[in-house]
Image: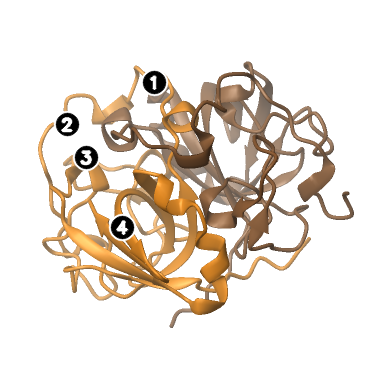
Chain colours: A orange, B brown
Amino acid sequence: MTCMELRPIGVIHTPFACAPGTPIQSSRAEGAEGTVDVFPEFAQALQDLDGFDRAWLIYWFDRAAEPKLLVRPYLDDRPHGLFATRAPVRPNPIGMSPVRLLRIEGCRLFLADVDMLDSTPLLDIKPYVPAFDHLPADRIGWLTGKVPQPQRADARFERGGV
Amino acid sequence: MTCMELRPIGVIHTPFACAPGTPIQSSRAEGAEGTVDVFPEFAQALQDLDGFDRAWLIYWFDRAAEPKLLVRPYLDDRPHGLFATRAPVRPNPIGMSPVRLLRIEGCRLFLADVDMLDSTPLLDIKPYVPAFDHLPADRIGWLTGKVPQPQRADARFERGGV
């Protein structure tokens, strides 16, 4: 087995210093703007990314509390299995967000629809491609009827939070 | 900075022993079936996942070749920046696939639309939610006009491959 160790490829900057008030999904972020500074050693890997309207950012939930198996998510009052939620308190605290690419200047990406904390370590960038990423999924379990409005986080999943 | 070390939460089983012939995306997998064995210590975290038609599997490309900054992807003859592609030869070799959940029996998930190699280490499971994951993205850069057909991989990104 390869050693599964990660190294940051850049840093994400957003207006959100702590969980309370942070949007809980890109699609609920109401256009919130941020930037990514990709480390210069990866500059060449950004070539042609500016042709895409949107990209997946893969990042590390560096301020999430310890993993839990059952969580009470933001969008429901009842507990659910962690893997049936998008809560950050995961065995491998990896987040993914389909942000909007406004423009790229050198190694800096200008973004909209950001929903992560300021200074979050970036792990990967992948182009967002509707032909790959839009798949039919009618049944959405406990989330049925619960995803219409913008929604903000609170401190429940933050390290040292309540 | 938290130490960014990953631990597998399970193993993905598919019909694909090596890259040549493996589908390159879930959406191009023509229903190929597989399973996930989640390790028993995470059983409780699967609660309520069976309500969802589809889930994101997050996994480790354990047999990918060394990272490259420029790659010639399966769907084009010209090189592109790695972060403008979904090729597996990434600084952090993390893959994500929106597979179909057929059923769950204990810690075993029965899946369709699998596009990963057999025995791939699983890192995370997240519910697939169109309200979160379907976002507008008209411009898809170099992929414009290149994503209509099913497509299979070859050995170019495999460790020891050509």
Q: At 26% across and 72% down in the image, what residue appears? A: A118
**Total marks in image:** 4
**Residue type at tag 2:** Lys
| Label 1 element class | loop
Q: Earlier in the sequence, mark 2 or mark 4?
A: 4
Q: CA distance from mark 3 to mark 4?
A: 41 Å
Q: Which residue is mark 1?
A: A137
| Label 2 element class | loop
Density class for disc 2 (Cα within 10 Å; few <14, some 14-19, many ≥20) is: few
Q: At 37% across and 59% down in the image, what residue appears? A: A89
Q: Nearer the viewer, mark 2 or mark 4?
A: 4
| Residue B93 against residue A72 in the figure, above or below | below
Q: Is residue A106 left or right of residue B28?
A: left
Q: Earlier in the sequence, mark 2 or mark 1?
A: 1
Q: Which residue is mark 3?
A: A78
Q: Is label 4 on the same chain as label 1?
A: yes
Q: Tell me the number on the disc at residue B89.
A: none
**Residue type at tag 3:** Arg
Q: Which residue is mark 4?
A: A103
- Along the viewing direction, whichever of B97 and A113 lies nearer the viewer: A113
Q: Nearer the viewer, mark 2 or mark 1?
A: 1
Q: CA distance from mark 3 to mark 1?
A: 23 Å
| Residue A48 against residue A11 in the figure, above or below | above
**Residue type at tag 4:** Arg
Q: Which residue is mark 2?
A: A146
- Residue A139 lies, in percent from the top left, at 35, 19
- Along the viewing direction, whichever of B102 and A106 lies nearer the viewer: A106
Which chain does the numbered disc 1 sit on?
A
Which chain does the numbered disc 4 sit on?
A
- Along the viewing direction, whichever of A80 and B76 lies nearer the viewer: B76
Q: Earlier in the sequence, mark 3 or mark 1?
A: 3
| Residue B76 against residue B42 in the figure, above or below | above
